[in-house]
Every structure is written in C-alpha cells, then in structure tokens.
Amino acid sequence: MRSILAVVSLAAALLSDPGASAAQERGLAILMPGAGGVTPIDFMVRNESRIRAARIATVVTTSPDQAAALTRAAVEQNRKVFLLGMSRGARDVAQAIQSGARPTGVVFVSGALNTARDILGSPAALPAALVIHHRRDECPQTSPGDAQRFVAWAGGKAALRWIDTRGQPHPNPCGPRGAHGFYLQDGPAVSAIVDFIRMR
C-alpha cells in the first residue's frame, strides 16, 4: 500500500501543470526514513508536512530502487530532485545513487554515514550534500565524529550543519526522542533542509 501511495503522490507531483504550483519550482524531496520505517515518530515522516509547506513536493519511500526510479522520472520532467535520508535512510540514499539516481542534491540527517560512504565508494558519486547532525548524538552508528569524517572525505561536496537542541537523555540512543532525533525539536534541521533545497 505504501508503494502504491508513493507512486500516486509522485504522479501528482510530476504530472501536474508545471505552472500550476510553486512546489514544482522548488523541486521534489524524496524522504527516506530510518530503521523504524514509515512511522509517525520518524523525523522524515513527522516533518513531511513542514517540508511540503515550504512549497516542496514530497514522496516518502523506504525502497532505494523506487527512489532511483522516482528520481529518474523527476529529472526527465526537468524537475530538481533531492534525496533525504534519516539515520539508516542514509544507506538507502546511497543505494539509490548506486542504482542510477542522479539527484540535484542529498541531505543526510543523523545519517549512518560510514555505510553510505562505503556504498558510494568515491566522492565522485556524491552530488551536492548537506549533513545535519546533533553534536551529542550517542548512537554508535551515527557519531558526530563520523559526520566530520564524511564531510572531509567528500572533498568539498558536503556541508555540515550542527544541531544543538537540548533535552533529556533517552534510553535508546538511536531513537527519535534523544539527541539522535534532535529531542523532537526539529525546527533548525527542517530550516536547514529547506534552505539547502531553495539554494539549488
């Protein structure tokens, strides 16, 4: 059902009259959630409406192959398209690129960046990228040090935006309620995403 809804959403985003909606002018954001999948608490899912409110069309998918197909369809329609991955979704973004996606840019949010880097293999495969990371992320797969190393590896293709929101520690360091998920204080991260898309 989610796959069908994503395709329907894509059709609405891509096949409408280009002059009919300002969302088309700001591109399409393909949102790839983290390990928990398409759940209301996931960063990408809970902020889809906020990204769409910035007049950016959105589609949510957990399938790298589908993300690659959606990207190709958008590019064929001369749309700007961005792949956004949360946590494990960074791996899915990298796999979509390896499957032939050629997005305008990518955004990694609290991303599993070592895995993404291994999949990409070379900075040459990376489009313009924004890395959004909390300075106190304690998830072993998404440490702040990994974010810094990824940006250095990218050789100028990636910018790093630190998030410094504060909140109570959470028993699950890789869950959405702790620093990994910005303590559910998403404003700075969403603003960074919207600015990145608007600038391209």
Image (spheres, helix red, strand yellow):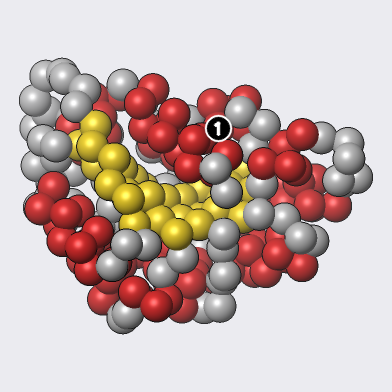
Tell me, yes or no, if residue 68 can be seen here.
yes
Q: Residue at x 18, y 32 (%)?
A: 179
Q: Residue at x 41, y 69 (%)?
A: 126
Q: Position of residue 163 (x, y in %)?
A: 24, 32
Side (left or right) of 112 relative to 18: left
Reply above or below: 25 against 187: below
Q: Residue at x 46, y 65 (%)?
A: 127
- Residue on which disc 1 sits: 51
Q: Residue 90 appears in which quarter of the rendering?
A: bottom left
Label 1 Cα crowd, 10 Å radius (few <14 / some 14-19 / many 20+): some
Q: Residue furthest front?
A: 156
Foreground residue, 136 or 123?
123
Side (left or right) of 107 relative to 29: left
Tell me, yes or no, if residue 45 can be seen here.
no
Q: Residue at x 66, y 47 (%)?
A: 27
Reply above or below: 183 against 25: above
Q: Position of residue 62 (x, y in %)?
A: 48, 57
Side (left or right) of 170 relative to 180: left
Side (left or right) of 26 relative to 179: right
Q: Position of residue 194 (x, y in %)?
A: 51, 35
Instruction: State how many labels appear.
Output: 1
Task: Look at label 1 and name its amino acid.
Answer: Ile
Q: Under tag 1, what secondary structure?
A: helix
Q: Residue 115 appears in which quarter of the rendering?
A: bottom left
